[in-house]
């Protein structure tokens, strides 16, 4: 029989780092709570023995309220039919914060499954002067306690031995209850269990005793709601009666439970842990005094964001030019190798110009990912969330919402998934609906190309910053600035309710781990390149085909006749070459206008004219529905196939600068560039995010709402931006 | 039909089939993009059953 072990613990105790060390996999880790929001399976190899290990989301208790906590409680109590029953538990605990960690452990003991305690973060405990006698702790708990340091991969031989012992049945399951609960509470659980046993048919399963305890204690909790949904109000009356009988000394049931558990924890710790003077403040607390200060913390936050965006702009430039040059050389090489014709156009104008236009942004994507990973891993992101809560909490979102929103700056999908940690359904749905407004890495290529082409390199703030970096920061801030009123409206209308209190754990500061940071940057780069090679490639080919066909023989004949006429006109060699080049461009433009895409584009163009866009920008925007960065590829293809490229053009930036309306006016200017950026900052052009919203909310109406309100906001925002900036910057 | 046109037709056909499958997978609610953030595997299912 296969052994399946569950890896559990409080949030941010290093469970995933332990999981990676045991399985050799590389699941995402981070120095803040809520990184793991779904279960991940891996295999632990112990010689010939293979053990299935499930990494579960972090939780403080089995009193499940949020979706990720429900997963943990159900898996541990063997209540998920899609999961193999758990044979044993590895509990990862933070050695520097044992009191809170052992509270959860006291609940796990009652599951009557053999368990191992992995005492992680021993280095931090040592630094704080906390001495732990792990042998005494092991004896008190009745289970192996193995000190480990997950990020340094220390202590894992001993942990593997303990896992093998568990697999071989050498570890005994603990006794049912270790905490000194009042007799009235135990009797009430017994009574409730008896009642529930008579309703097994209606419930569809026998409810285990730990779950019965949760039904009794957690008023309004998930366990109660699930049973009430099946048994109705009659059971509700029984439950109220049992709750009344269970309490003693005027305490509430949750308080009674907490008192009993903490008494047990205190007793265990008094036998095994020696602490230094509690008045001594840790290094993290001293740093927090500055970084979470309302004024100094905000100044530091703005400063660090400015440094990040300035660096993205200035550091990535040379590498980007190198990649751009290489892609240009590849295009030229293939162009000279293939004969003129349909295949050359597909490869050079379609694939190389399209996919290549996106790939040149890889250095910026990697840099942004590097900065986000460094800030996450050192523990600063949780402080940023704390500051944001102070600044933006008035809109009705709790501090729990800000971690998903911060995650969305890399990609909205993990951000939407991270909302699982939010207890309150209204808060969770509001967060899911506003998280895609944060500027993800897919928007970066759109910003960079528009800023690079049309925003002047003016120095600002005494020469420390450049205008492009400031505009880039403003674009990233726009999503947050719009998310606040949108969240406020949602909380005042569809999701009306009180703002829940801020519950945010501050992780200890630590030096970022090179390996963890590298993995995140690598994964981000891999995702980006994979998307360029698959989805973007496919869209580019289809866009090229729609923009290439049909090829009218009348156009070819007409331009051939004009070329013959020009050749016989007796122009100088230089003038002749210029005129022939003009004719070539005009011919390409004529083909494009008569193509399937050209005709469709002209039909929709009036809708986009108030934003200053022509049909090519409009078509590229619509084609970018699957992923935002596709617009860059589509612009690359369309403007490469049209009449706007001259021989001096180097890359898409020059091509866009040279693009014109049919009457010869420049197509792009600062107002058009700004309107495109604002549109992409606010629009919902990401099919994968919409699918994830459906998966997380269970209904299509929520992604439909997100798409509708974001598209409307983007459309109106782009029109206002174009019209206002055209008035302010006439002739820009 | 020339070899050149056959190659172009094959590439365009591949792109159309890829996009059709992508859209079908998306409509069925399957993972279609970045995001699970884990080489160890994607989550088996969302928590929609709990809402």
Image (tube, rainbow, N blue to C red):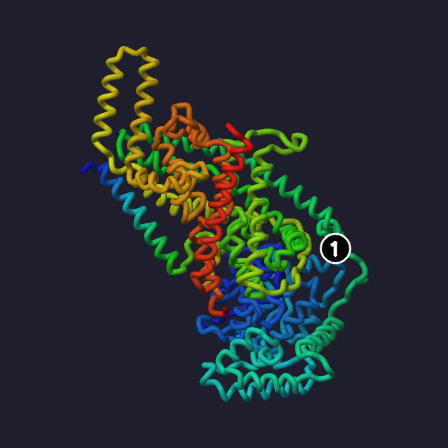
Identify whether A637 is placed above or below A87.
Answer: above
Dot 1 falls on a residue whose secondary structure is helix
Horizontal and vertical percent position of residue A189:
60, 85
* Position of residue A607 in the picture relative to residue A346 (left or right): right
Horizontal and vertical percent position of residue A666:
43, 28
Which chain's residue wears label 1?
A
* Position of residue B16 in the picture relative to residue A199 (left or right): left
Mark 1 sits on what residue? A285
Horizontal and vertical percent position of residue A720:
51, 41
Total numbered labels? 1
Q: Nearer the viewer, residue B12 or A488?
A: A488
Horizontal and vertical percent position of residue A731:
50, 28
Q: Nearer the viewer, residue A707 or A132?
A: A707
Q: Is residue A422 visible?
A: yes
Q: Specify the quadrant of the image occupied by residue A596.
A: top left
Q: Specify the quadrant of the image occupied by residue B11.
A: top left
Q: Is residue A515 visible?
A: no
Identify whether A699 is placed above or below A263.
Answer: above
Quadrant for the N terminus of chain B, please.
top left
- Which residue shows up at 52% across the image and 81% down it? A207
Q: Specify the quadrant of the image occupied by residue A108.
A: bottom right
């Amino acid at each position: 029989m296969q052994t399946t072990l569950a890896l559990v613990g409080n949030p941010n105790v290093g469970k995933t780092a332990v999981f990676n060390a045991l399985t050799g996999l590389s699941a995402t880790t981070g120095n803040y709570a809520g990184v793991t929001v779904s279960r991940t399976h891996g295999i632990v190899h112990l010689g010939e023995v293979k053990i299935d290990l499930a990494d579960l989301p972090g939780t403080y208790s089995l009193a499940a309220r949020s979706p990720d906590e429900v997963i943990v409680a159900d898996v541990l109590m063997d209540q998920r039919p899609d999961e193999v029953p758990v044979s044993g538990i590895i509990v990862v605990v933070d050695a520097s914060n044992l009191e809170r960690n052992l509270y959860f452990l006291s609940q796990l003991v009652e599951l009557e499954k053999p368990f191992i305690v992995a005492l992680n973060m021993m280095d931090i405990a040592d630094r704080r002067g906390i001495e732990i006698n792990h042998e005494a702790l092991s004896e008190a708990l009745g289970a192996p306690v193995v000190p480990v340091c997950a990020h340094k991969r220390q202590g894992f031989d001993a942990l593997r031995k303990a896992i093998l012992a568990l697999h071989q049945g050498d570890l005994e399951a603990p006794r049912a209850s270790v905490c000194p609960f009042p007799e009235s509470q135990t009797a009430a659980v017994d009574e409730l269990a008896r009642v529930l046993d008579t309703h097994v048919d209606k419930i569809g399963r026998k409810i285990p005793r730990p779950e019965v305890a949760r039904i009794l204690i957690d008023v309004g909790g998930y366990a109660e709601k699930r049973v009430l949904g099946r048994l109705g109000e009659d059971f509700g009356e029984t439950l109220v009666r049992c709750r009344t009988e269970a309490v003693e000394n005027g305490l509430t049931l949750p308080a009674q439970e907490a008192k009993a558990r903490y008494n047990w924890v205190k007793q265990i710790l008094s036998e095994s842990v020696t602490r230094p003077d509690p008045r001594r403040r840790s290094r993290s607390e001293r740093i927090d005094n500055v970084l979470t200060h309302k004024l100094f913390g905000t100044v530091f936050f703005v400063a660090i964001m400015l440094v990040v965006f300035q660096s993205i702009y200035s550091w990535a430039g040379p590498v980007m030019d190198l990649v751009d040059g290489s892609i240009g050389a590849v295009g030229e090489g293939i162009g000279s190798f293939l004969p003129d014709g349909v295949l050359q156009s597909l490869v050079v104008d379609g694939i190389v110009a399209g996919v290549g236009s996106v790939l040149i942004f890889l250095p910026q994507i990697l840099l942004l990912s590097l900065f986000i990973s460094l800030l996450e891993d050192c523990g600063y992101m949780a402080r940023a969330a704390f500051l944001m809560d102070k600044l933006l909490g008035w809109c009705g979102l709790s501090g729990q919402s800000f971690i998903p929103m911060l995650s969305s700056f890399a990609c909205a999908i993990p951000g939407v998934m991270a909302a699982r940690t939010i207890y309150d359904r209204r808060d969770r749905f509001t967060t899911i609906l506003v998280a895609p407004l944060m500027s993800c890495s897919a928007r970066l290529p759109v910003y960079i190309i528009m800023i690079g082409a049309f925003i002047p390199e003016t120095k600002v703030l005494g020469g420390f910053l450049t205008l492009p970096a400031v505009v880039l920061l403003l674009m990233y801030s726009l999503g947050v600035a719009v998310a606040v009123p949108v969240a406020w409206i949602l909380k005042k209308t569809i999701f009306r309710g009180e703002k829940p209190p801020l519950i945010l754990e501050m992780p200890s500061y630590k030096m970022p781990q090179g390996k963890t940071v590298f993995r995140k940057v690598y994964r981000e780069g891999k995702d980006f390149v994979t998307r360029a090679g698959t989805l973007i490639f496919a869209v580019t080919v289809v866009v090229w085909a729609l923009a290439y066909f049909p090829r009218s023989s009348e156009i070819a004949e007409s331009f051939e006749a004009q070329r013959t006429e020009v050749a016989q006109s007796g122009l100088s060699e230089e003038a002749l070459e210029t005129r022939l080049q003009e004719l070539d461009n005009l011919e390409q433009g004529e083909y494009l206008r008569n193509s399937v895409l050209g005709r469709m584009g002209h039909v929709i163009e009036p809708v986009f004219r108030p934003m200053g866009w022509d049909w090519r920008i409009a078509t590229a925007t619509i084609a970018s529905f699957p992923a935002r960065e596709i617009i860059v590829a589509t612009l690359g293809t369309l403007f490469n196939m049209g009449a706007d490229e001259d021989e001096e053009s180097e890359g898409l930036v020059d091509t866009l600068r040279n693009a014109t309306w049919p009457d010869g006016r420049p197509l792009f200017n600062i107002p058009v560039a700004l309107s495109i950026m604002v549109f992409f900052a606010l629009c919902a052009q990401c099919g994968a995010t919409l699918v994830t919203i459906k998966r997380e909310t269970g209904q299509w109406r929520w992604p439909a709402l997100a798409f509708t309100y974001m598209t409307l906001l983007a459309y109106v925002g782009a029109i206002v931006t174009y019209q206002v900036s055209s008035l302010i910057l006439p002739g820009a | 039909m020339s070899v050149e046109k056959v190659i172009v037709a094959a590439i365009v056909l591949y792109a159309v089939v890829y996009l059709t499958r992508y859209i079908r997978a998306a409509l069925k609610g399957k993972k279609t993009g970045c995001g699970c953030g884990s080489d160890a595997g994607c989550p088996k299912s969302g928590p929609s059953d709990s809402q």
